[in-house]
Image (cartoon, grey):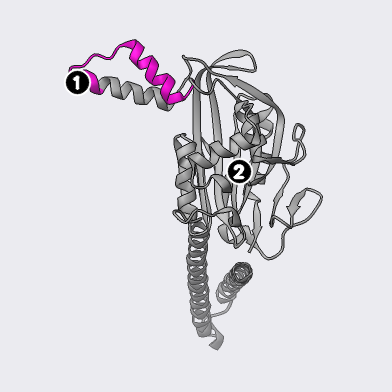
Amino acid sequence: MGQENTTQEKEKRSTILDSVSNWIKLVALIVLVMEAILLLAMTLTPASEPIFTLYPILMLLLALAVLAALFVDRLQHRKSDIEKIKATTELQKVQQTVKVDTMEISVDPEKSKTRELEKGANTFTDNMLQFSFKKPVGDGWQDPKFIKYADFVRSTYFSMLSDDKLEELITANSPYGKLFFNAKIVNVVFGETEIIEMDENTSTEAIEDYLENMVEKFKKEGTEVKEEEIKEARIKLNQTDSISKIGFAVDFKIIVMDKNDMDIPLMNNSLPNLFLNFGMFNKEPIDSLNTEENSILWTTTNKLKNVMVDGQPCKNFSIYRLYRLLKNDDYIYFCSAQWSPQIEGAHFAWDSLKKSFESFKILK
């Protein structure tokens, strides 16, 4: 609220300065017209008249008035420009901005926390879980739905494991396992889920760069790397020996984790620790990262090579993802959005997806 008042005060001050500037310009114009009238009167007045000697003095005074007015105008504009630069700098300090490919995402950590959640026909609000966001608009967007973490894992990796088996697997591989498994998820999907199938030839741009560098390194050391060894390394790095297909949809997802489910004393629920843990599972190159005390924002790009998308071969398939971590006294929130320009109609979905992601708010 204090920041909004400061912004309004600056806007009012700028308006006043603009008004003063316009007034000074008007005065200067009037003075110049008077100068012209005095000059004309001087040429028409005989030199012997007493008033004749006063014309130059009056014209000089008016000229000095114009110069003073212009000086004041420049001084006020300079002050206004300095204030605008300061205001822009302050805004840049507050805003968290990241990029993915050529697209920019910007959030305001201060405004992301509110004492009263937004409501409205186009706003999804959950008072119990203490968050709200603007729903994506446009054809193709489905209504927000709640799903269990286990169902999310099954639908993404086409796993047939039961809830008990998944819980055992998730809690065994992460100190935050219980926190994840008991999380409540709100998912908003665009269109239908596509099936991305992978085989031994599937890779990513990052993996191929890594393999190329390693082969070059071994060559310099005098060791020849066989093609079969490269193939085995590719399969291991891409995990296609254990994951043969995944489900993908353009969507906006919010994972809400209750802090009461964090019962491992070894790790705390700080955002940096959570970020490091997520990074262990999401092995994607980070495009951009911006951190604040109560908000971590980052983006990734995953460029898949040699996959089947919905039954059709695809040599290159790009997935762009937005991530954000923030928390309040009761919950930890993990926001994610994923998008690909190669999904039919996805170009029309990006703006709505971006606005929904940026609009996310939680209770203080």
Mark 2 neighbour class, 10 Å CA radius: few under 14, some 14 to 19, many 20 or more: many
Relative depth, front residue between 238 and 59 = 238
Q: Is residue 343 left or right of residue 64?
A: right
Report the residue marked by disc 2.
181
- Name the kind of residue labelled 1 in the image: Lys
The range drawn in magenta is 217-240
Looking at the picture, tell me which residue is in the foreground, 122 or 16. 122
**201 and 305: which is toward the camera:** 201
Q: Which residue is mark 1?
A: 220
Percent coordinates x, y for residue 68 in the rendering: 49, 76
Give the structural element (helix, strand or loop) at label 1. helix
Residue type at numbered disc 2: Phe
Left or right side of 307 for 228? left
Q: Main secondary structure of the magenta part?
A: helix
- Residue at (70% x, 50% y) in the render: 133
Residue drawn at 59 percent across, 42 percent down: 336
State which quarter of the image contains the N terminus: bottom right
Residue positioned 61% across, 24% down in the render: 342
Q: Residue furthest left?
A: 222
Neighbor class of circle 1 (other Cα within 10 Å; few <14, some 14-19, many 20+) is few
Q: Image quarter for residue 357?
A: top right
- Could you tell me which residue is drawn at 71 percent across and 63 percent down? 116
Whether residue 350 is situated above or below residue 94 in the rendered picture: above
Q: Is residue 268 magenta?
A: no
- SS under mark 2: helix
